[in-house]
Amino acid sequence: MRTRLLPLLIVLMAAVLLALGVPLAVSVAGAQQQNVVVDRIDDTARFAALAQFVTASSGVNDSASATNERRATLSRELDSYYDVYGIRAGVFYGTDTPMAHAPRDWYLPETGEVRDAFEEALLSRRSHDPRQVWPWQRNRLVVASPVIRDGDVVAVVVTDSPTGPMRSRILHGWLVVGAGEIAAMLLAIGAALRLTGWVLRPVRVLDATTHEIASGRLKSRVAVAGGPPELRRLAGAFNEMADNVEDVLEQQRAFVADASHQLRNPLAALLLRIELLGYELPEGNEEIASVQNEGKRLAQVLDDLLDLALAEHAEADLRVTDIGALAAERVAAWAPTAAAKGVRLVGDCPPTTAWADPVTLSSALDAVIDNAVKFTPEGESVTVTVTADGETSTVVVTDNGPGLTDEELTRVGDRFWRSGRHQNIKGSGLGLSISRALLAAGGGSLSYRHHEPGGLTATVSVPRSPAS
């Protein structure tokens, strides 16, 4: 859920920051250009005042030398302006003839922005504000102001500025804005991480608790604290459901255990009476022998039911255990039984430690090896191999028996299930269920798969380190 919620929040915050940052960047560029335009307007106004003084000195009472001196002063000002700022500037009469200009090889072009600004100023209007210049453009900035004497436009002051410094300042302003946007985005991502963590913390706790309950730790519960109210209500409902499920399972276990225990005494008395009755009948009577066998089978089923109820309720006594030594011990214990049936029982059990309950693991290995020997034909072999892989130690029991079909393989270990092809073989169908429940209590597992070319492979897995 976090992988879906977090990108959505980041995209929304990025869109908000972008919506704020773009107008801010445009405003920075506009402000920088406006400052330059205002400076050029001030400069053209100053040059226009000097040019007006030159034109005003052209009257009959002024000498030619005074006019030339004032025009020279204007030329020096324009030259100095160009030398210092690199800005081309000039004062031109309406006939395009320059009064003064710098540099000396710069004249009014026939077309372009300079010509348009000049024509606009001839109409006694200051030229329009130039178009916005962006950092990737190499445009020039043109400003023109009219020189007015006695209400008439006698000349026009034109400045043609390079935009490099202005574009540099705009770019610098954009970098500052971008850095601020990035910093704000990082803060927003941090806030989003904290927010999603706060919102989803109850979900993570709920998920972990669900996994614990599914693994058999039915006492696990969710702490109803923190998070949105909806998730707190969900946690409360989950705890209530877990309590009800635990009560139902506990009642089921108690019923199975009590029923198995209560039925054993009447069944023992019934088997005793059947045995006494057998003494009154001729020796070798098949009917009485069949009844005795069925009675013993029912007693075994009741014992297995009681063991299963205890296994599902018992806590595992986990400790560091030498799996290799334990498996070798069970192989040695089952070797006479396998030899009596004509089956070779082979063990490859190097020393390997794991975190397991020795009694539980012994019971599980007994059930698996018994199952393998039971279904392996005479003359075949059963192999027990102990290995360690990463965080898990395994005991693999492989037989060369008839094996199971794919459909049967999915049901192996179910309670009371037995293959239809092996109903005549002694068993209750509960041994593997008991083993699986005992292993699960300690974090272990029991699985089956096909063995080629024939037979079955059972894998008992236990962790090499204690569960967190």
Image: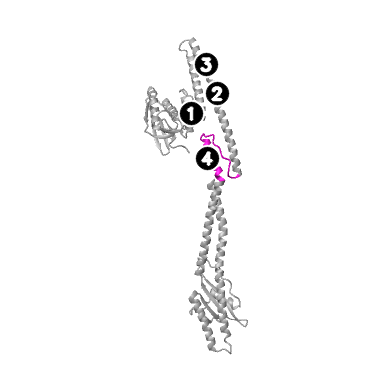
Question: Which amino acid, by three-letter code, is at mark 4?
Answer: Ala
Name the residue nearer the viewer: 272 or 382: 272
Q: Residue 259 carries which label?
A: 2
Residue that numbered label 4 is attached to: 208
> In the image, which residues are magenta?
199-228
Residue that numbered label 3 is attached to: 269
Q: Which comes before the other along the chain, label 3 or label 2?
A: 2
Q: Which comes before the other along the chain, label 2 or label 1?
A: 2
Horizontal side of residue 379 vs 8, given as left or right: left
Q: Position of residue 259 (x, y in %)?
A: 55, 23
Question: Which amino acid, by three-letter code, is at mark 1?
Answer: Ile
Residue 14 part of the magenta-drawn span: no
Does dot 3 land on a helix, a strand or a loop? Answer: helix
Question: Which amino acid, by three-letter code, is at mark 3?
Answer: Ala
- Taking the view exactly as shown, the residue that stands out farthest to the right is 151
Residue that numbered label 1 is attached to: 434
